[in-house]
Structure formats: structure tokens, C-alpha cells
Image (cartoon, rainbow, N blue to C red):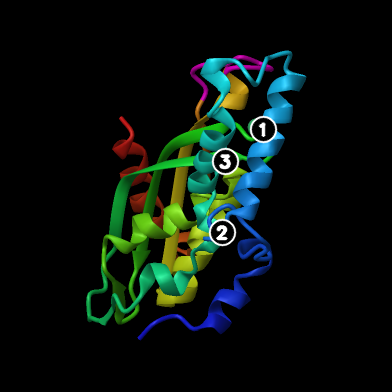
Amino acid sequence: MSSTPASEAAIGGALSPARGPSLQLADEAPTTAYAALVRDQLALLGENPEREGLLKTPERVAKAMGFLTQGYTMTLDDVVGDALFEEDHENMVMVRDIELYSLCEHHLLPFFGKAHVAYIPDRRIVGLSKLPRVVEMFARRLQVQERLTEQVAKAIEEVLQPRGVGVVIEAFHMCMMMRGVEKQNSRTITSALRGVFRDDGKTRDEFLRLAYTASR
Ligand SMILES: [Zn+2]
């Protein structure tokens, strides 16, 4: 069993941005156009795009940005595939310390950290390695941490229809660390709780305790 395109659409909207020409497609034109922009950007920074160290930078940046935003071309169907199984397990399933790297949509600067993802199945489980892939699918887009957290929770809810989902993300934002307030050690923590994780105090406490001990 796998999620249908309809379920992807249901959690869509902001989840699935319009698929325009993108850096990830085999079509070279977007990459060439992006590289041209980077060349202009270098000049506007007062640099000389023709100097040796920068000659290949525009193409490298275009390729790097293509990689860092490849989540736009991924769908839940691609990511979860047929790794859904019927199972009577009724306890919490949790994958902690999922590394994540994303780009903040306000500054196009990285934010990075960890996600802790848990759910309580309702007769359906997913291959464990798929949870990090769901995180990656949404992290490799332009993001704000709050939306990323919600999207991961919604996606798992859609695919598994579990009794509950909990997601905690803790991340460092380069836009805070390198500029503005220059707070090098402040972590931003966001959470999304659904179903029994929201409604049942014991489940919520167990999840949050596991999530927060994970980071120590
Ligand atoms: Zn930012």
C-alpha cells in the first residue's frame, strides 16, 4: 500500500510548490540561468567574477543549490514507496537524532540540527529508514523551521493514519549566528503534536522526555 497522489495533494498547498523549471531537472537551461545570476551577484559584491578562484563558482553554486533544494522534486510516494506494512504493534515508534540540513527562506542561509520523529501506529507501520527520508524531503527546500516541523508531522499522519504523531526539531540558524543578533549558541526548538500526542498527557510526556533526552 502506498500513499496516493490525492493524499499528497491534501497536505499540499505549501507542501508541494508548483513544479516550475528547476535546477534538479535534466534540462540544463535553469542551471545555466542560475549560474549567470550568481556571476552578477559576485560582481555586485564588488568581486571580479573573472578571477581564477571564482571562474567556476557560478556553476558550482548552481549545482549546490540544485542539491540543497532537491526536495522540490520528491513526493511522498517516491519517498515512502511500498515500505508500508500491516502490523499489530501499538506502542510508540521513535527515530531520534535525525540530522537535518535546510535553508531558511528569509536569508537563504543554512539552518541545521536534529529531528526526533515518533508515532503510535494504528495497524500500519512504515520502514524505519523512511522517517529520515520524509524529513529530508521537506528539509531540502526553502523553509522556516516551524513549517518544516508541521509538514513532517502532516506527511506521517497522511501516510500512516496513526493514532498520533510527534515531531520535535532543534536547529541552529546561520542567519542568527552569523548576522543580526549573532547568538552563536541559541537553538530553536519547534514541535508538532497530533492525535494522542496532543490529547493524551502521558503519551505527550513520554515523547517529549525521549526527544529532549536525545539531545543531551
Ligand atoms: Zn533566516
Task: Give me the C-alpha separation between circle 3 and circle 2.
Answer: 15 Å
Q: Residues within 10 Å of mark 3 (few under 14, many from 20)?
A: many
Task: Look at 55% across and 37% down and name the residue there.
Answer: 59
Q: Quadrant of the N terminus?
A: bottom left
Task: Look at 68% across and 23% down and name the residue there.
Answer: 42
Q: Residues within 10 Å of mark 1 (few under 14, many from 20)?
A: some
Is 169 on the left or on the right of 181, as rendered? left
127, above or below 65, in the image: below
Q: Nearer the viewer, residue 168 or 23?
A: 23
The answer to whether the residue bearing label 1 lies less than 8 angstroms from the nearest atom of ligand 1 is no
For label 2, the residue is 72
Which sits earlier in the primary sequence, circle 1 or circle 3? 1
61, above or below 75, in the image: above
Is 153 on the left or on the right of 33, as rendered? left
Secondary-structure class at tag 2: helix
Q: Is residue 58 visible?
A: yes
For label 3, the residue is 62
What number is the disc on residue 95?
Answer: none
Q: Position of residue 214 (x, y in %)?
A: 30, 39
Which sits earlier in the primary sequence, circle 1 or circle 2? 1
* Kind of residue at badge 1: Val
Nearer to us of marks 1 and 2 is: 1
Q: Residue 40 falls in which quadrant of the image?
A: top right
**What segment is highlighted magenta in the picture?**
178-186
Q: Is residue 193 visible?
A: no
What number is the disc on residue 38?
Answer: 1
Marks 1 & 3, CB-CB < 8 Å contact: yes
Task: Look at 69% across and 37% down and name the residue there.
Answer: 36
Q: Residue 50 falls in which quadrant of the image?
A: top right
Which sits earlier in the primary sequence, circle 3 or circle 2? 3
Is 122 on the left or on the right of 144, as rendered? left
Q: Position of residue 24 (x, y in %)?
A: 53, 55
